[in-house]
Image (tube, grey):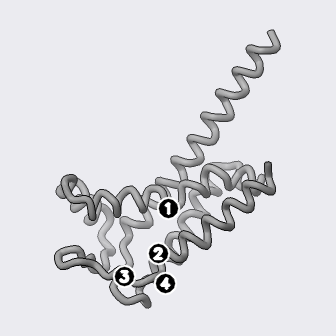
Amino acid sequence: MRLLATLVLAVWLVAALVLTLQSAYPLPGQVVHGNLIPFHTLVIYLDNLGSWFWIRNALGNLGLLLPLGLLGPIAFPALERWWRIALLALLISTAIELTQLLVPDRSADIDDVIVNVTGALLGYVILNATRRLLASREQGNRQ
């Protein structure tokens, strides 16, 4: 199981880098400029819930690091603590955002970091909830 989780994480990392570090080619009105004010872009997301562009952006940022929280502890037991997942997600997301400053039609946004870390922690919660559910079912089968 550990090897499979490691392989899936490796494929995910390559896909995540390809998705986040290529030019975006936005349509008019979809250009997002850099943002260092926490929750500024999140307010834009909420104000534009009818726009597929903004919904896709929000869900993409939420899902980007979700596999880290979901598979990271399986692949690397040192990631069993939530704060280690959060710290690693923070480092990865910050590195991606800073690198995006060098990519045409990309920008760095602190809200992307916030949502990426939230997604990783959501994956961690899903993993632990699944583990508890499976453990309780297994214990029920023994009785």
Residue under label 2: 20
Graded by Cα atoms within 10 Å as few (under 14), some (14 to 19) or many (20 or more), the crowding at tag 3 reads many
- The answer to whether 26 appears left or right of 117 in the picture is left
Disc on the earlier residue, 2 or 3: 2
Which quadrant of the structure image shows residue 136?
A: top right
Instruction: Measure how far apart labels 2 and 4 are at the Cα level.
Output: 9 Å
The answer to which of marks 1 and 4 sits earlier in the sequence is 1
Nearer the observer, 79 or 3: 3
**Location of residue 21 in the rendering, given as x and y in whole percent from the top left corner:** 48, 80
Give SS at disc 2.
Answer: helix
The residue where tag 3 is placed is: 106
Do callouts 2 and 1 mark residues in contact (Cβ within 8 Å)? yes
Question: From the viewer's perspective, is the residue at label 1 or at label 4 nearer?
Answer: 1
Name the residue tied to disc 1. Answer: 64
Q: Amino acid at mark 1?
A: Leu
Three-letter code, disc 3: Arg
Q: Secondary structure at mark 1?
A: helix
Q: Nearer the viewer, residue 24 or 125?
A: 24
Query: Amino acid under label 2?
Result: Thr
Disc on the earlier residue, 2 or 1: 2
**Of callouts 2 and 4, which one flags the residue occurring earlier in the amino acid sequence?**
2
Which element type, helix, strand or loop, lies under badge 4?
Answer: helix
Q: CA gap, disc 2 to disc 3?
A: 9 Å
- Mark 4 = which residue? 99
- Asked if the residue at tag 4 contacts the one at tag 2, i.e. Cβ–Cβ closer than 8 Å, the answer is no
Q: Residue 47 at what x, y percent from top left?
A: 17, 56
Q: Earlier in the sequence, mark 4 or mark 3?
A: 4
Count neighbours of disc 1 (C-alpha within 10 A) and say few if under 14, some if 14 to 19, many if 20 or more. many
